[in-house]
Amino acid sequence: MAWIFWGVPMRSASLAEWILRCCTSRSRAASIVGDLVELRPQKGLFWFWISLAGAVMRLLWRPALALVAAFYASNWVFSIFQTTLWGAHSLHHIPVSINIPGTNHAVPAEILFRILVGAGESLWLILVYSALRHSTLDPSTQLAAALTAATTALVFLWWQILALVGLLLFLVVVLSVFLLSRIRRNALVTVLASVLVSSSGFMLSLLLATVWQEFLKPRPWGGQDMDQHPSVLWVAFCLMLSAAWVTTATYSALRNHFSSDRLHGDTASKLLSQA
Amino acid sequence: VLRGKVELGRRIAYIVGIVKPKPPAALGEFEQLVLLAILRLGDEAYGVSIRSEIATCTSREVAPGALYTTLDRLEDKGIVRSRFGDASLQRGGRPRRYFSLTRKGHSALVSALEAYQRMMDGLDLLGGAHA
């Protein structure tokens, strides 16, 4: 039968490859499944699937742990940043709108704060995930660390002109360094695209959670209402976790895409397209 | 150009003693086995042959998942590099991924084996009182 290779139905091998591609890059998944297909005549079909399950487990435990840790860290940072920004706002009587230097435009402080909180939360998510999953030596982790440090400093010191100038200089240096080489440019694209996905995802999840809350009972909500409708918390939690998962999946996919290009050039893509 | 200047600066710093050279990457026992298997196999080192070589030399059946995660980790650390071979019918049209040691991997392995050798000096484990 044409769809059988050495005793392994082609559909099984394709399914196995599709499963592995969810956990690693396309080229690595193809080579692992190729090895399993090669050994299948000696070891059997049961061994094939058990080995695949083992490989998936080993490839997944680290990303899963990294996702949980990153999600926890980002939520923690979210609450700290919110408290700090709005606390400083009321404590220092900061004006409701902030003038952009050199222009006549004024931006409401609320919008700037929300952008800062969103960017900070996303960057912390990416930093923790990347450090645990890909090590601190990875250029994407290093860029995420630099941007996270800058954003965190901005949250705590944004009303001090000297700090703003220092941070601006720091960002210019970091961006210049990361624009110089191709590997670092790829890291820049990976981190910035992930921040965009993360911010959009968190905003969408908050919107959907609010819609669900309004659907259950229109505002205002009291403590008793929350006890009567615990699904509000669970829905919000699941939506936020989904947003975090989409972010980390995007981050890993982009990183794998770029590192695959870097390591194997066109060879892997050519071979895979021939296969 | 910039990378070259950074490298030159680093070398000068080593020479004048400002910066100590980086120690070779630490390797676990299984990582050493994998690297030795790659060295023994030469150009034919890919997942199946590495697994088989370890089994032949150590009578130890290696789980494929453990081997691939180790190889991925070693590649991410720059200790091994990989290239793709030709796709074959035997493998369902999928290419083999061949591994070889980088210079960094070679020095890490030599350093790990030297450490073992130093620990074994003076002990007659293979034929003396401890055998």
Image (cartoon, rainbow, N blue to C red):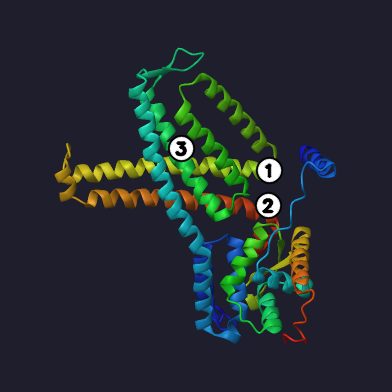
Position of residue B124 relative to residue B94, above or below, is: below
User: Mark 3 to mark 1: distance in Å?
Assistant: 26 Å
Residue A273 visible to the viewer = no
Count of labels shown? 3
- Report whether mark 2 lies on the same chain as mark 3: yes
Front-most of B125 and A36?
Answer: B125
Drawn side of residue B88 relative to residue A251, left or right: right
The C terminus of chain B: image quadrant: bottom right
Give, as a three-letter code, the residue at label 1. Arg
Give, as a three-letter code, the residue at label 2. Arg
Residue A128 visible to the viewer = yes
| Residue at image point 63% right, 72% down | B93
> Which element type, helix, strand or loop, lies under badge 1?
helix
Q: Quadrant of residue A85?
A: top left
| Residue at image point 51% right, 73% down | A54
Residue B130 % position (x, y): 72, 85
Position of residue B98 relative to residue A108, above or below, is: below
Q: Nearer the viewer, mark 2 or mark 3?
A: 3
Position of residue B107 relative to residue A246, above or below, is: below
Q: Check whether the beta carbons of the residues at disc 1 and disc 2 lie within 8 A of each other.
A: yes
Q: Check whether the beta carbons of the residues at disc 2 and disc 3 lie within 8 A of each other.
A: no
Residue A229 % position (x, y): 18, 50
What residue did someone put label 2 on? Answer: A262
Q: Earlier in the sequence, mark 1 or mark 2?
A: 1
What residue did someone put label 1 on? Answer: A182
> Which element type, helix, strand or loop, lies under badge 3?
helix
Give, as a three-letter code, the residue at label 3. Gly
Residue A97 % position (x, y): 38, 19
Label 2 Cα neighbours within 10 Å, binned few <14 / some 14-19 / many ≥20: few
Q: Quadrant of residue B92?
A: bottom right
Label 3 Cα neighbours within 10 Å, binned few <14 / some 14-19 / many ≥20: many
